[in-house]
Amino acid sequence: MTLALTAGHSHTLPSTQLVVGKQGELGAAKGSVALGAMSDRTLVLLKPDAIRRKLAGQIISRIESKDLTIVAMDLRQLDADTLARHYEDHVGKGFYAGLVEFMSSGPVVALVVEGPEDTWEVMRTLMGATNSRKAAGGTIRGDLSASFTENLVHGSDSLASAEREIAIFFPNL
Ligand code: IDP
Ligand code: MG
């Protein structure tokens, strides 16, 4: 059979060797073919403005409509220590104090979102530019916000960031 791999290549494999499963399950069966990661994950936060404005359902609906999968979800209040870990690259910047004030002004919904490949990038495309005033129409920020700081949603900005941030919010995953 011909199997289209996530890397975009096509390989011919005997069907008996094909093991379909989630990340981590691949290669578990004897004689299976190591196909590499078939899925990857990113951290998403629905920020306090999204919860206050009752947009959580709409934003989650956009994520699901893109055929991404929610594998963890939690409503929680963030404290300054957690935010300093999460936003470690931004500590000390001019906007940081305002960012912490905003991000701790009410609960957030933390999500781990899974897709077949480059999920962090797929999510960032759905979100739109950081400054919502400049974000393209059709994106979450472009359609639903007109603020720079209060831009509704966080998404990890690389695979490495996704792994680091998921470990902060969901250490048991
Ligand atoms: P991102 O959320 O698109 O990854 P970052 O540059 O990582 O953007 O900034 C983190 C968050 O800090 C932004 O989402 C936004 O809420 C806020 N922020 C970033 N830059 C500014 C700024 O110049 N003014 C006001 N708020 C900012
Ligand atoms: Mg960022």
Image (cartoon, grey):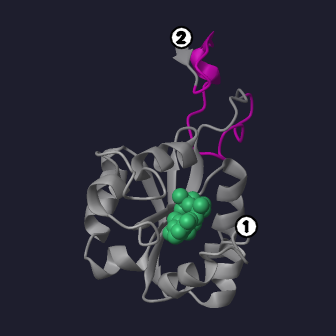
Q: Inspect the image, locate mark 1, and give the three-letter code of the amino acid beneath it.
A: Asp
Residue underneath mark 2: 2
Q: Is residue 154 magenta?
A: no
Q: Which mark is residue 66?
A: none
- Nearest to the observer: residue 9 or residue 58: 58
Q: Nearer the viewer, mark 1 or mark 2?
A: 1
Which residue: 60% across, 20% down? 16
Q: Position of residue 137 (x, y in %)?
A: 29, 46
The quarter of the image holding the C terminus is bottom right
- Nearest to the observer: residue 73 or residue 79: 79
Q: Is residue 149 above or below residue 126?
A: below
Q: Inspect the image, locate mark 2, and give the three-letter code of the amino acid beneath it.
A: Thr
**Would residue 43 be seen by someone viewing this image from the given angle?**
no
Instruction: Find ligand 1 in the image and state its quadrant.
Output: bottom right
- Nearest to the observer: residue 171 or residue 129: 129
How many circles with numbers are drawn on the protein?
2
The crowd level at tag 2 (other Cα within 10 Å; few <14, some 14-19, many 20+) is: few
Say what secondary structure mark 1 lies in: loop
Counting residues from the start of the chain, the first of labels 1 and 2 encountered is 2
Say what secondary structure mark 2 lies in: strand
- Residue 56 position by quadrant: bottom left
- Residue 82 position by quadrant: bottom right
Residues tagged 1 and 2 counted as in contact (Cβ below 8 A)? no
The residue at the far front in this view is 94
- For the magenta stretch, what is the residue range? 6-31
Q: Position of residue 38 (x, y in %)?
A: 60, 37
- 119 horizontally vs 138: left or right: right
Q: Is residue 15 magenta?
A: yes
Cβ of mark 1 under 8 A from ligand 1: yes
Q: Position of residue 48 (x, y in %)?
A: 41, 80
Residue underneath mark 1: 89
Which residue: 73% across, 67% down? 89
